[in-house]
Amino acid sequence: MVDITHKQNTLRIATAEASVKVSRKETIDAIQKNTVPKGDVFQMSRAAGLLGVKKTPELLPDCHPLPIEYTGIVFEVVGLTIRIECTIKTIYKTGVEVEAMHGASIVALNMYDMLKPIDKGVEIHQIRLLSKKGGKTEMNKNLKANIQAAVIVCSDSVSAGKNEDQSGKVIVDALKQWKVDVAEYSIIPDEVFQIQEKVKQYTAQGISLIIFTGGTGLSPRDQTPEALRPLIEREIQGIEEAIRNYGQQRTPYAMLSRSLAGMVKDSLVLALPGSTTGAKESIQAIFPAVLHLFDIIKGAQHNK
């Protein structure tokens, strides 16, 4: 199975369809009048579809077991064709399009099985995905703002050349994945003055996203939150909560996080952990959803 441990739960919706075509009008009449010998075709086929949806991961090796929180199966009769539509919803880390297509196909197969004694010309036609929603791909697709970022590594040892930066490079690579232009990448010691000067410099340059990594621990030299807090004009607790919640699901040590998020003018300033894992997970926790903040800012500026 594909590793999805880094993904977040989001609302996922998928709708698929299948078609069953009969060879004569009498078959449609028998279905609608509920005179098919094997029973109520619509109700029994709907029940079969529900079972099919639930058993999808048992039959397809790479499908993850996931909580199915809604299944809707509807029928539409058009001439000699019965159109089947199957909609699945879940709040989970991966999508439900395969479950929707499997559900639609099982409904069609059950209808075929029930109708074959009275109609030898029944055919199953196109099984296809109609739509899917949810997940990071859709969020990023809808992003409109062009964003420049600055990544600043706060570390005495890295700035002195004793250690090599890892967390900053992880953040830079992640930002490129989300098509954010990394205009600046720098390394500074854990000094309050230098941290504050970087914020002033990049906000003056109009950099939209300013990310600090390091200095968020509890040692005497970890001063990044203290340096940034006097400059923050509007703190965004939701971003901080999202980072901690994501981390807490992976390690109990996330409770010690002092990550910070807030606005300085029109720039979003983030203080993330200095560990490679902490920085990576923090980015995974809030991207790309956090980028929509800049669409909001862009809209507010346009309306002034």
Image (cartoon, rainbow, N blue to C red):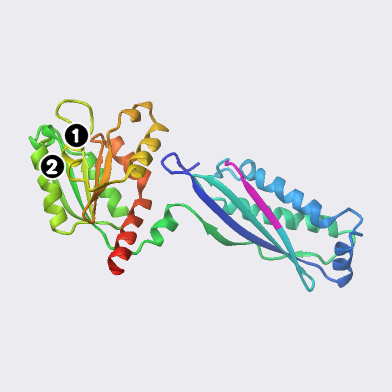
For the residues bearing labels 2 and 1, Cβ distance under 8 angstroms: yes
* Residue type, numbered disc 2: Ile
* Residue type, numbered disc 1: Gly
Q: How far across and down, in percent of the image, does residue 252 sit?
A: 38, 26
SS at badge 1 = loop
221 on left or right of 244: left
93 on left or right of 123: left
- Quadrant housing the C terminus: bottom left
Q: Which residue is mark 1?
A: 215
Which residue is painted at 57% across and 51% down in the image? 96
Vertically, is 291 above or below 144? above
Which residue is painted at 89% across and 69% down in the image? 26
Vertically, is 145 above or below 209? below
Q: How far across and down, in percent of the image, does residue 208 sit?
A: 23, 56
Which residue is painted at 34% across and 30% down in the image? 254
Q: How far across and down, in percent of the image, does residue 102 sit?
A: 65, 52
**Local crowd size for mark 1, using a 10 Å CA cut-off: few (<14), some (14–19), many (≥20):** many
Vertically, is 229 above or below 131? above
SS at badge 2 = helix
Nearer to me, 70 or 159? 70
Q: How far across and down, in percent of the image, does residue 25 sit?
A: 86, 72
Magenta stretch: includes residue 39: no
Residue interval drawn in magenta:
66-73
Q: Which residue is mark 2?
A: 195
Which residue is painted at 69% across and 47% down in the image? 52
**Local crowd size for mark 2, using a 10 Å CA cut-off: few (<14), some (14–19), many (≥20):** many
**Separation (CA) of disc 2 from disc 1:** 10 Å
Vertically, is 222 above or below 144? above
